[in-house]
Image (cartoon, coloured by chain):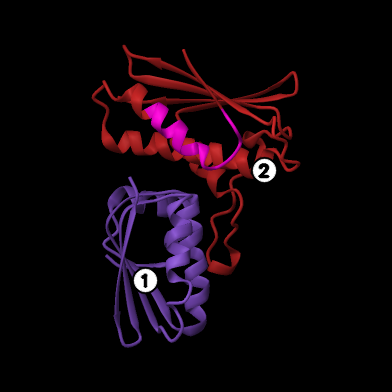
Chain colours: A red, B purple
Amino acid sequence: MDEIILKPEIRELKTLDKKVTELLEPYDINKSTLMNLKLIIEEIFSNICNYAYPQKDKDDLIKIKMDFCENILKIRMNFIDTGIQFNPLEVKNPKSPNTIDDAQIGGLGISIMKEYADDIQYEYINNKNILTITKNLN
Amino acid sequence: MSLKIDKEKNENNLTVILSGELDTFTSKELEKSLENELTNVKSLTFDLKDLIYVSSAGIRTFIKNQKIMQKQGSMKLINVQDSVKDLFTMTGLIKMINIEE
């Protein structure tokens, strides 16, 4: 199990990407699958940065645990934050808009995450949001 | 990976060729790069031939530009890669923006 603790600042996404890339580098994983994983990570991380901590405290952190299963090429990631309680699974997918003026800007990232992850679980324990996603990489 | 932005202007037509990744960081670069370029543009084309990654931030940038362009002309996306097109279909962008085959 790998673990990384980051500040909820969007530039930290680069640190997280690097960590995931290093973890998966030795394995022969399809490029488009890696791109989909990167997309899930960007959407989750940027959602936390943008919405979880409106007060902006220097002690705010996001902990990410990564569990990679080598035999079946599957990664499980827990995103743990102590920000505002938020269950993305309760967000209804924005109705697919027909015109540009109907386009809902919010919710897009959540729809993308739901589409590209193979499994998503959410728990709120001890004032922590714990979002667990699983992505098959084979 | 980053984003390369090439612009070709021909009278009122602007073509923006994007190569690489359009993510939360590079979509800001793109918005900045287009900030003062759209005045008098009647036709805006994004050539996505070498664009391999788009996130919701990138989609928002296309929506923003579409909103600008529908007031003064038109906008289209060309040479969209299949994986990117799948994302546009899934998010409904394909119904809002002219994507040329």
Count of all numbered marks drawn on residues in the image = 2
Tags 1 and 2 in contact by the CB under 8 Å rule?
no
Frontmost residue, A21 versus A39: A21
Apparent side of residue A68 relative to residue B64 in the rendered image (left or right): left
Q: Disc 1 residue type?
A: Lys
Q: Quadrant of residue A18?
A: top left
Q: Is residue A75 above or below residue B26?
A: above
User: Residue A128: image x %, image y %?
Assistant: 70, 24
The residue sitting at the front extreme is A58
Query: Residue, x 42% and y 77% (percent of image)?
Result: B37
User: Residue A67: image x %, image y %?
Assistant: 45, 16
Q: Is residue A130 above or below residue B90?
A: above
Identify the subunit bearing mark 2: A
What secondary structure predominates along the stretch shown in magenta?
Answer: helix
Query: Residue, x 41% and y 54% (percent of image)?
Result: B88
Identify the subunit bearing mark 1: B
Give the extent of the magenta segment.
A6-20
Query: Residue, x 42% and y 67% (percent of image)?
Result: B33
Frontmost residue, B12 versus A106: B12
Q: Which residue is mark 2?
A: A51
Q: Secondary structure at mark 1?
A: strand
Q: Which residue is mark 1?
A: B76
User: Residue A131: image x %, image y %?
Assistant: 59, 27
